[in-house]
Image (cartoon, rainbow, N blue to C red):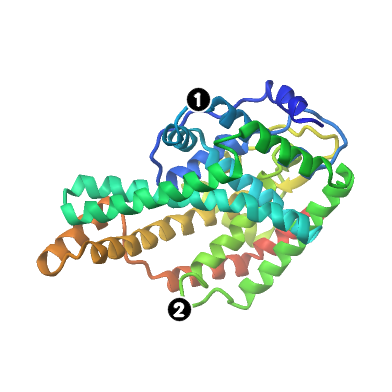
């Protein structure tokens, strides 16, 4: 399918809504929602991977072509508002899924898309920190924050210019389209079996790691954060193929059912959370995913995410204060003010990791989820 045909199909698809920025990581998470819903509109039997990746490349092309007469600064500003970071993130995720199928081709795609998402993320964070520094009015703190902002902006602009997305968007899109069209893609039925197998194997392996308390670590990155990343990947893999997945209200067994009932009592929108809303399938035989268990996984990811944000914000507080050169009483004042502004907090991450592992292990949620997929 040519780029032009992809774009024509996309005319019937809800395009990216304009979103407010600059963005914190939480805003980025919420921004993912609408863009993740951008499901394919053509029900055919071609490769699911090809359809998903081509769809998102077309979204990127459409945006950057619309910015041809804008300055680099305005283009990046509009990209932040329009959610381009999310599209690159989804491309990165889709490619990562298929690395097990072809490590070279999809590994290279994943790395290419990841560099854009990484630079958007760094600039996003730099904008947020600079905004907080301005609110506090500390001259030295603001100087350092603005230095970080300029550095992140220049790095992002460089990768976009070198890749051609800013300077020659049509050429960059055509080169990517050729790269995709030249690949020998599998059929849709093969892709369905592949993704199903990936999810089953992955969920069972994660269940074993939880049972063996692999995420009980002093290092938050290897403990609580890694547990969240591993759980979140299940959500990413299903929603990255929105339009190819159908959620089903499966019956729940034993302790999983009790956990679901408990969560439902305190979270009335457990099954209507914006992060697990899927469009109707566009293929005849979509992958059926147990929705209630997926909702529990999503809730655990959200809970850990809130703790993660607070802990990471505290780390950024310390970095900014050290870099500003503040000492003594002024240092303590800045720490208190930034902690409040960034909603930062000290987190007993190891205790939290143990709590979530205990719930996952006792209910055998991940094992049951894998069984329900087969």
Residue 46 vs 299, above or below: the answer is above
Figure quadrant of the N terminus: top right
Figure quadrant of the C terminus: bottom right
Identify the residue at image location x=84%, y=43%. Answer: 182
Q: Which residue is mark 1?
A: 69
Quarter holding residue 40: top right
Q: Is residue 373 left or right of residue 37?
A: right
Identify the residue at image location x=19%, y=56%. Answer: 140
Real-space Cα distance between discs 2 and 1?
Answer: 51 Å
Which of 75/199 is in front?
Answer: 75
Q: Is residue 27 left or right of residue 321?
A: right
Q: Is residue 298 left or right of residue 343?
A: right
Q: Which residue is mark 2?
A: 218
| Residue 14 x %, y % | 62, 25
| Residue 347 x %, y % | 36, 67
Identify the residue at image location x=74%, y=25%. Answer: 4
| Residue 53 x %, y % | 72, 41
| Residue 8 x %, y % | 73, 22
- 10 Å crowding of disc 1: few (<14), some (14-19), many (20+): few
SS for dot 1: loop
| Mark 2 or 1, nearer chain start | 1
SS for dot 2: loop
Residue 103 vs 27, above or below: the answer is below
């Amino acid at each position: 399918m040519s780029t032009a045909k992809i774009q024509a199909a996309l005319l019937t698809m809800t395009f990216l809504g304009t979103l407010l920025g600059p963005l914190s990581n939480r805003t980025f998470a919420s921004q993912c929602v609408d863009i993740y819903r951008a499901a394919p509109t053509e029900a055919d039997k071609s490769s699911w991977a090809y359809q998903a990746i081509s769809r998102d490349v077309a979204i990127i092309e459409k945006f950057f072509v619309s910015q041809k007469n804008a300055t680099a600064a305005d283009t990046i500003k509009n990209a932040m508002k329009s959610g381009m970071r999310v599209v690159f993130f989804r491309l990165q995720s889709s490619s990562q899924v298929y690395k097990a199928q072809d490590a070279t081709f999809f590994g290279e795609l994943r790395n290419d898309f990841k560099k854009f998402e990484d630079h958007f993320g760094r600039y996003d964070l730099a904008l947020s920190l600079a905004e907080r520094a301005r609110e506090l009015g500390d001259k030295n703190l603001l100087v350092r924050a603005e230095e970080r902002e300029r550095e992140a902006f220049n790095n992002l602009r460089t990768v976009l210019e070198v890749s051609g997305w800013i300077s020659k968007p049509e050429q960059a899109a055509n080169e990517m389209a050729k790269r995709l069209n030249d690949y020998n893609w599998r059929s849709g039925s093969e892709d369905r079996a592949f993704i199903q197998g990936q999810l089953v194997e992955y969920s069972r392996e994660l269940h074993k790691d939880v049972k063996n308390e692999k995420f009980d670590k002093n290092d938050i990155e290897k403990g609580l954060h890694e547990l969240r990343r591993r759980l979140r990947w299940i959500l990413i893999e299903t929603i990255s193929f929105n339009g190819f997945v159908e959620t089903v209200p499966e019956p729940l067994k034993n302790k999983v059912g009790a956990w679901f009932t408990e969560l439902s009592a305190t979270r009335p929108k457990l099954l209507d959370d914006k992060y697990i809303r899927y469009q109707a399938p566009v293929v005849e035989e979509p992958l059926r995913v147990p929705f209630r268990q997926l909702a529990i996984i999503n809730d655990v990811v959200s809970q850990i995410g809130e703790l993660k944000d607070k802990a990471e914000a505290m780390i950024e507080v310390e970095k900014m204060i050290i870099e500003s050169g503040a000492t003594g009483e002024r240092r303590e004042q800045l720490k208190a003010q930034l902690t409040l502004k960034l909603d930062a907090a000290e987190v007993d991450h190891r205790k939290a990791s143990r709590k979530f592992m205990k719930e996952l292990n006792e209910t055998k949620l991940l094992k049951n989820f894998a069984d329900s997929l087969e």
